[in-house]
Every structure is written in C-alpha cells, then in structure tokens.
Amino acid sequence: MHMRYDPLLDYTQPLTDHDVEEPRTPSKRLNMDKPWGRLVCLNGRTKVIDLVKDSYIIGRSKDADIVVDDCPSCSKKHCRIRLVEDMPCLQDTSFNGTLVNGRRIVKQKASLTNRAEIEIKWDQYFVFYNLLDDPSFEDTNRQIINNRYYIFETQTLGAGSFATVYLAIDLDTCERLACKIIDKRKAKSSKGNREEHKHSSDSVIEQEISILKSVKHPNIVQVKDVVHTEEFVCIFLTRVTGGELFDYILHTDGVQEHEAKFIFYQILLAVKYLHGMNITHRDLKPENLLLESPKPFSRLIITDFGMAKMLGTSLERMRTKCGTFSYLAPEVLDSNVKGGYSKRVDCWSLGVLLYTLLGGYLPFGTDDNPTELSKRIREAEFDFGGPEWRHVSNDAKDLICRLLEIDPERRLTVEQALQHPWIASQEDLLCRLYARMLRKSEAAAARFRSNGEDLPFGTH
C-alpha cells in the first residue's frame, strides 16, 4: 500500500464560467476511441467506468449516463464530468452540492486531476483517474485496503509523528470511518536507546490495538477493524464529526460553567471506566477529546490511545516519560528519580483540562520555555486571578486545586472527583442529561443505519 497526501489545491481548482463556456479548440487526443478518464464507483462492489465521450451526467434520472440509485441527496441530474480542451472538470448542477476532495462545490465547476475524490453526501463515492496524464491503471486500487476499505488521501483528520488519521469508507456498508495509519518504518526509527523509551515499537502498537479492542464505553472511541500490511498498521475507528474539544474551547473563549460541568462529567465517567480496567491514558488533553456534534451538551469521545498503558495490577508503576508537556504531572517529569508513577497522572491532566475548559487557557502556560514550564508544574504554580474566573464557582476552583495536587497520594482519584460537591450537588441532573444524550445518540444511530449512513459516534 502506498499512502500519500496531496494538498487540496493540487487536486481541485475553481474554474470560471469563461473557462468552461469558451469555444473549445480541437482535442489533442490522438485516439478518440480511447478513454480519457476512468471513474471508479466505491459503493458496494467496486465498479469501473471508462470515460470516452466528452461529457457524462451523473444523477438519479434514467436518462443520466451514470445512474445513481437509492441516494436521496442525489439530484436527477446531479453533476456533469466533462473534458474541456483536454482538461477534465466537474460541473455541479444540484441543490445539495458535490464534494471534490472534501471541498463542497455548488452550482460551480472544478478541475479534476488524477485520483480526485468525488462524493455525493452521504451515499455515493467516486474516484476519478486522469488517463491523459497517466494512461496506466495499475495502482487504481492501492487506496483500497483488504478489499473492503477505501482511504480518502485528501481528507486528513489528524496527524502525528508516525501516524496519520484519514477519512475512510467501508465499501460494504458505506459507513464513514476514521482510519489511523501507523507507518511501521517511522515508528521503528523513532525508538529511543532505552527499552522504556520505545513507545513506537511493535509491542506498543499492539498494546494500543489491544486496549482499543478491550474497551466498550459510550465516551471512548470504538475500533471497527485492524488491518496489517507490510508497511502500515491501519486501525479503523468510528468517526465523530463535531471536531476537537480544543477548537470548541477556542471558539467559545472558555466554556460556560454549566456546560463545562457536563463535559467534565462525561470525561470522568470514561476515565473511571479505564482506571477500573487498569488502563492509564497518559495523554488526556482537549485535542484528544472529540465531540459528536458542535452543538452544546454534545457527547464527548476520548480518542488516541497511542500513549495508553494497561497494567497487570493497580499497584504496578510506570516510568516512561510521555504525554504532552503542558498536561504532564510533576511525578512524570521525575519518573526516573522517584520510582515511577501511577494512574493518578491522568487525574492531574483532568485538573489541567478543567482549568482550560473554564478559563480558556492553560494553567501553566505552553512549552515555549521547557525549563520555566517544568518549574511551574513541579510547584503547581497557577492562579485564578484573571477576569474570566470572577463568575466561576468556588466549588469548581476547589476541584481544580485538588486535582492539581503535587503529591499524587493526596491528589483526588476519579472516584473522589465524582463525589466532589461541584459534581455531587447536581448528580441527579447530570445523570438525566447523560441518559437523554445517550437516547438522542441512539435515535440518531438508528436513523443513520436505516439510511445506510455512517454513525457519528462510538456505539456501546
């Protein structure tokens, strides 16, 4: 399998009406009977359509050149694929629009270069191959994994040092998924000299997969499938569409306390579940928390278990210095000196999270100056002096302080955090909100299943 990401502009460029309507010069094609393009339909069994004529209409109408069945969002004449002066282009003629490499085109035209990805939401998927640029068709299926999953290379959902998350589709069910692709070569080359620093080794990759397969919780991402190739490990996960909590905090400039409480309540329930299975996440941060919907009081999903560790017993200690600097507990910074650390490092990260949720910024700052940041973390040097804290309750501030306790033995556990007055005083309301959220999610799940669409959250 060959994975490559090309910028959006390399694939799709807007065309003006003048570009399309201008009288065409004679085609440079030497053989007018040979196809100038090839369209691969990804729904159900993969179908290959050779494009020989200068224009093809895609739509639900029986008069269309490429008829699309069972797609409510598809118009009778949805879009047209044309060859204009030897330049392939897509012209949308619908009300709902057509996605070209993730970009929505409505009543507009876009050029199509080799391997452009076309989508009629949420039901029909095509890939266009420009045979004028590349007459070979040998690598057409290189993005199809295990004869079942197609990877959309132009739609990157996230990226790390040796893993990238792409949008994918299950060709059997048409469910949209997130596919985390781990590059084995990059993973191995990033190993440290010491055994305890080999986060990217095969055993650590397998541990992430093992953890994901073992957990089943409404607020934890669910693994659908795992495919191993010679160069990559492909982890297919349920996809959520509400974005990262990090972006939500930025857009709201700090979340209102009543909503922050519900978000935090969900995180506590998920981390309590993990800790009950002796799993420590070790990288809890807003970037690893996804929202089912961008609307308030959405379901929250914990993702990215690349740093997670499953211990044999609750008494075992961890020594690896890993995670995101601004969220690291003091004992992680000194793990080699003080005999390791326990799952309570997650509780420290929860304190940083809650502070960031309510304040809109990090309690200890960023890692622009690692020495200064380390000092502030080791001394738990933070305050509530800004104007954004004036309307935050004392109970919320107290919970933050108890989670950002330097001594891990005195730091609140997740169970104790759930019993803290900030949560416990409204436990009945939070439980009702949580139950209603799950009912809405399940109703949405049933609706998506009946329409053959993807689930926007992890099932449980």
Image (cartoon, rainbow, N blue to C red):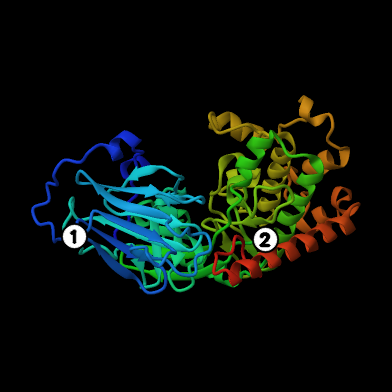
SS assignment at label 2: loop
Q: Is residue 197 above or below residue 251?
A: below
Task: Return the x and y of residue 6 as percentages of the image width and height.
Answer: 33, 46
Q: Quadrant of residue 218?
A: bottom right
Residue to which mark 2 is pinned: 219
Q: Which residue is mark 1?
A: 35
- Left or right: 80 with respect to 219? left
The relative height of residue 323 versus residue 68 in the rendered view (above or below) is above
**Can I make out residue 194 in this image?**
no
In terms of secondary structure, where does tag 1 sit?
loop
The residue carrying pointer 1 sits among few (fewer than 14), some (14 to 19) or many (20 or more) residues within 10 Å by Cα, namely some
Name the foreground residue: 299 vs 294. Answer: 294
Q: Earlier in the sequence, mark 1 or mark 2?
A: 1
Q: Name the residue located 65 percent from the left edge and 52 percent from the top edge.
A: 293
In x, y percent, where is residue 258? Answer: 82, 44
**Does residue 54 appear to the left or right of 250 in the view shown?**
left
Could you say which is closer to the camera, residue 81 or residue 46? 81
The amino acid type of the residue labelled 1 equals Pro
Relative image position of residue 149 (x, y in whole percent): 41, 67
> Distance between the Cα atoms at labels 1 and 2?
49 Å
Extreme residue in the right direction: 425
Residue 250 seen anywhere in this rendered image of the structure: yes
